[in-house]
């Protein structure tokens, strides 16, 4: 029940976070994470940039309330490749598996936040990623740019 509360809190913050396609055209995931962190903090949330997880020291992008939840941020464009390059998707699924399956005692809630154009949300790649993120026990959210 507590985990759902964290997801609800995060969802509330995400509803008021607005990015345009122009805003993210020339920035990377790390910069998007920093914008999100600024938004969370300015709205009263306790968040920090990156938290080391497990023996391998993987870093989840945003730590919410000192390990209560972790948010991994990805750009939709990087996950949808017309060239058949699925390296980013493979990396993401590996991260999610590692976080959600092995270290829920460190971060009880893992959320994958994909940011991108509305049309990309409907792509087969994103739908497939969502399916496996949720199958691994993590939460999936898609933040549409305007």
Image: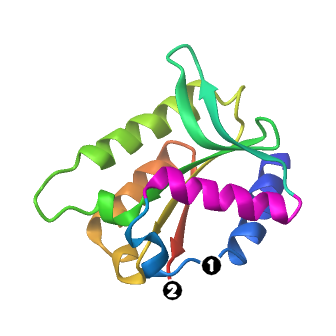
Which residue is found at the position 10% from the left and 60% from the top?
83
Find out whether the residues at labels 2 and 1 contact each other: C-beta distance under 8 Å: yes
Residue that label 1 marks:
18
In the image, 1 versus 46, the foreground residue is 46
Q: Quadrant of residue 17?
A: bottom right
Compared with 59, 43 (above or below) is below
Residue that label 2 marks:
146
Compared with 40, 59 (above or below) is above
Compared with 93, 77 (above or below) is below
What color scheme is it?
rainbow
Q: Residue furthest front?
A: 26
How far is disc 2 from disc 1 in space, using C-alphas? 7 Å
Residue 143 circle label: none
Q: For mark 1, give the secondary structure.
A: loop
Q: Is residue 91 left or right of residue 10?
A: left
Q: Position of residue 113 (x, y in %)?
A: 54, 59
Which residue is found at the position 76% from the left and 35% from the top?
67
Q: Position of residue 82 (x, y in %)?
A: 14, 65
Q: Does the magenta-highlighted stretch encompass residue 29?
A: yes
Counting labels gives 2
Which residue is found at the position 41% from the left and 50% from the top?
132
Q: Earlier in the sequence, mark 2 or mark 1?
A: 1
Q: Residues within 10 Å of mark 2 (few under 14, many from 20)?
A: few
Compared with 88, 44 (above or below) is below
Q: Is residue 2 left or right of residue 134?
A: right
Which residue is found at the position 45% from the left and 70% from the top?
24
Q: For mark 2, give the secondary structure.
A: loop
Q: Main secondary structure of the magenta part?
A: helix
Q: Residue furthest left?
A: 83
Q: Which residues are magenta?
A: 28-44
Q: Is residue 48 left or right of residue 117?
A: right
């Amino acid at each position: 029940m507590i985990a759902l509360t964290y997801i609800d809190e995060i969802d509330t913050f995400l509803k008021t976070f607005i990015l345009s396609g122009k805003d993210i055209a020339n920035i990377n995931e790390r910069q998007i994470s920093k914008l999100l962190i600024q938004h969370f903090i300015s709205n009263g949330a306790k968040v920090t940039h990156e938290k080391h997880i497990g023996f391998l020291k993987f870093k989840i992008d945003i730590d919410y309330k000192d390990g209560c939840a972790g948010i991994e941020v990805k750009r939709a464009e990087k996950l949808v490749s017309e060239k058949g390059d699925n390296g980013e998707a493979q990396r993401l699924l590996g991260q999610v598996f590692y976080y959600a399956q092995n270290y829920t005692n460190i971060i009880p809630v893992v959320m994958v936040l994909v940011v991108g154009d509305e049309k990309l949300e409907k792509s087969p790649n994103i739908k497939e990623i969502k399916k496996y993120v949720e199958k691994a026990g993590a939460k999936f959210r898609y933040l549409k740019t305007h």
